[in-house]
Image: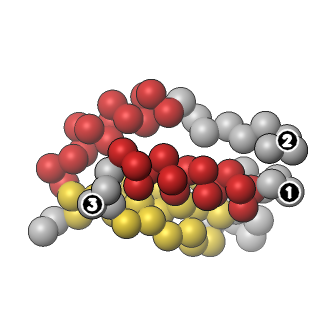
Amino acid sequence: MIRIIKHIIVEPKPDRSACSARIEAAVRATFPEATTEIVQGLLDDDLVVEVRLPLAQLDEWRAARARWADFSCPEGE
């Protein structure tokens, strides 16, 4: 199966572990066949949620990302 890789950058905030978990949960709930992993971003303090999903779900991914907006995690959440 061909998979695509998508990245969601998690801003460097004190609560980013909770934010990362929220992002992973949203992805897995919407795309059960997807796998997720937290990886290091390009900058030292960046984290990225790396999502791998079947190529056939690319259009669904685009629609879901539009619904999810930017995943901003307010301070203290």
Sequence order check, earlier mark of 2 and 3: 3
Distance CA(mark 2)–CA(mark 3): 31 Å
Residue at position x 50%, y 33% in the image:
68
Pointers 1 and 2 in contact (C-beta within 8 Å): yes
Marks 3 and 1, the one that precedes in the sequence = 1
**Apparent side of residue 12 relative to residue 25 in the rendered image (left or right):** right
- Is the residue 48 above or below the residue 57 in the image? below
Reading the image, the residue beneath label 1 is 14
Q: Is residue 42 above or below residue 29?
A: below
Q: Is residue 37 above or below residue 67?
A: below
N-terminal-most mark, 1 or 2: 1
In percent of width and height, residue 56 lies at 15, 50
Query: Of discs 3 and 1, which sits in the foreground?
Result: 3
Residue at 80% from the left image edge and 54% from the top image edge: 15
Circle 1 packing at 10 Å, graded few (<14), some (14-19), many (20+), is few
Q: Residue 33's mark?
A: 3
- Residue topped by disc 2: 75
